[in-house]
Image: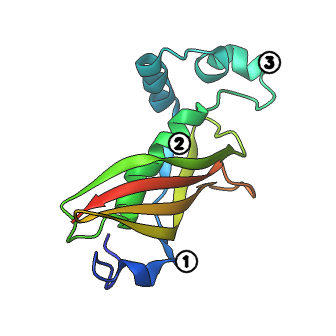
Amino acid sequence: MSINEYSIATIDQFIGRELGVSDWVVVDQQRIDVFAACTGDRQWIHTDIERASRESPFGGTIAHGYLTLSLLAALSIEIGLIPADASAGLNYGLDKVRFMTPVKAGARVRNRATLVSVEKTGGGRFILKTMNELQIDGEDKPALIAETLAMLVA
């Protein structure tokens, strides 16, 4: 998706504005299991369906917090964070992350992103700070809120 009239030349005009909302993404048990295998974090609350159904306060398995955080990059690209006239967009860091509500296996999430600031660093590079809210379908509280930093290269 592209944001109407959003480009490197006009990016300052979007500071303080919501850039958009991504489509919903399902965080199913297969995605959780693959993330566990990639990271080595096989804690039972994420991967043991029977035990989590019996012992978890959430009634079943939940996604890793860092799995939910990792979804922000692709969902931000889907929203159109990287302008079409940029040659590259790179993860640069995080300023603040708070995990608010666990994401149960099978839940749908989406990202709502607002451009907080743009810092011109020279050489055609820009640091974008974005406030992200990863919403859970049917939940009042988001899964997480995060201030992310992305570097754009003109």
Q: Position of residue 28 (x, y in %)?
A: 51, 35
- In this view, the mark in front (3 or 2): 2
Q: Do tag 3 and tag 2 residues touch (Cβ < 8 Å)?
A: no
Label 2, residues with CA under 10 Å away: few <14, some 14-19, many ≥20: some
The residue at the far front in this view is: 122
77 up-or-down from 115: above or below: above
- The colour scheme used to paint the residues is rainbow
Q: Do tag 2 and tag 1 residues touch (Cβ < 8 Å)?
A: no
Separation of disc 3 and disc 2 at Cα? 25 Å
Q: Earlier in the sequence, mark 3 or mark 2?
A: 3
Residue beneath the point at 28% across and 70% down: 83
Q: Position of residue 144 (x, y in %)?
A: 64, 49
Quarter of the image for the C terminus: give it. Answer: bottom left
- In this view, the mark in front (2 or 1): 1
- In this view, the mark in front (3 or 1): 1
Q: Earlier in the sequence, mark 3 or mark 1?
A: 1
Q: Position of residue 75 (x, y in %)?
A: 42, 55
Secondary structure category for the residue under label 1 = loop
Q: Name the residue that disc number 3 marks.
A: 55
Q: Name the residue that disc number 2 marks.
A: 69
Secondary structure category for the residue under label 2 = helix
26 up-or-down from 135: above or below: above
Quarter of the image for the N terminus: give it. Answer: bottom left
Kind of residue at disc 3: Glu
Q: Name the residue that disc number 1 marks.
A: 16
Residue beneath the point at 71% across and 20% down: 52
Kind of residue at disc 2: Leu
Q: Quadrant of residue 79?
A: bottom left
